[in-house]
Amino acid sequence: MRQVLKVVARIGAKDGETNLSWKPVRGAVIYMVQYCEKIVDETSWQAFGVTTRSRMTVTGLTSGQLYWFRVCAKGTAPGQGPWSDPSLKRAA
C-alpha cells in the first residue's frame, strides 16, 4: 500500500473541529486517522477514527489548540501503508 499524500487540514465549521482531506490511494479500502498536540515519539499519536472516504472531520478537539494530523491507508492485504507526513492546524 502506498503512502497517503497531500494531507490538508482546515479549520472546521464548529468549535473543536478540524477538516482533513487527502489524495486517495489506489487499492485503499479504509483510511486511519491519528492526531496529537505535540510530536514526541510514536506514542504521542492518538487514534481518531477510520473512514472509507478521502476526507474526515476530526471532532472533540480543544478550540484554538494546535494539532498534528496524519493518515494511513489499508487495503485488502494484511498490514497498512506508511503514515502520511504530518499536517499542522489549529482547531476551530
Image (tube, helix red, strand yellow):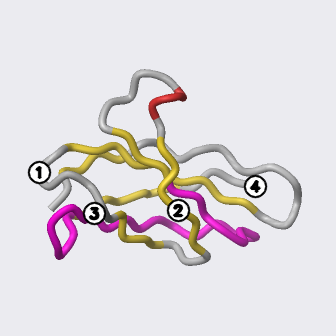
At x 47% / y 56%, what residue is drawn? 48
* Marks 3 and 4 in Cβ contact (< 8 Å): no
Q: Nearer the viewer, mark 3 or mark 4?
A: 3
At x 54% / y 28%, what residue is drawn? 42
The kind of residue on which mark 2 rests is Gly
Chain-order first, disc 3 or disc 4: 4
* Marks 4 and 1 in Cβ contact (< 8 Å): no
Q: Nearer the viewer, mark 2 or mark 4?
A: 2
46 up-or-down from 10: above or below: above
Q: Badge 3: how crowded within 10 Å, few (<14), some, or many (20+)?
A: many
The kind of residue on which mark 1 rests is Gly
Query: Outermost residue toward the left?
Result: 64
In the picture of the structure, the residue carrying the numbered disc 4 is: 1
**Rounded to the nearest whole Å, what is the CA distance between mark 1 and mark 2?**
21 Å
Q: On the picture, is 85 further left or further right than 89?
A: right
In the picture of the structure, the residue carrying the numbered disc 1 is: 64
**Rounded to the nearest whole Å, what is the CA distance between mark 2 and mark 4?**
19 Å
